[in-house]
Image: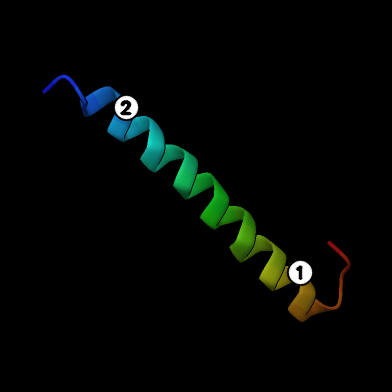
Amino acid sequence: MAGTGNTTRVLIVDDEQHTRRVLEAILQREGYET
């Protein structure tokens, strides 16, 4: 299981990027600039 740490790190990064896209979509829907 040597790659577990790297996999977890990638998932965390992907989750951060996904969260940012979701927040931007919500802000745009509410009429705010991102």
- Residue visible at 63% across and 54% down? 20
Q: Residues within 10 Å of mark 2 (few under 14, many from 20)?
A: few
Q: Identify the image quadrant of the C terminus.
A: bottom right
Above or below, 1 relative to 29: above
Q: Quadrant of residue 16?
A: top right
Q: Amino acid at mark 2?
A: Asn
Query: 34 or 30, which is in the foreground?
Result: 34
Percent from the top left, x then y, of residue 15? 46, 48
- Residue visible at 48% across and 40% down? 13
Q: Which residue corresponds to mark 2?
A: 6
Q: Amino acid at mark 1?
A: Leu
Q: Which residue corresponds to mark 1?
A: 27
Above or below, 6 relative to 26: above
Q: What colour scheme does the image use?
A: rainbow
Question: Which mark is drawn over residue 15?
Answer: none
Q: Residue furthest left?
A: 1
Q: Quadrant of residue 5?
A: top left
Q: Earlier in the sequence, mark 1 or mark 2?
A: 2
Left or right: 24, with 18 as reference point: right
Percent from the top left, x then y, of residue 30? 79, 78
Cα separation, mark 1 vs mark 2, equals 32 Å
- Residue visible at 21% across and 25% down? 3
Callout 2: SS: helix
- Residue visible at 21% across and 27% down? 4
Q: Say which of marks 1 and 2 sits in front.
A: 2
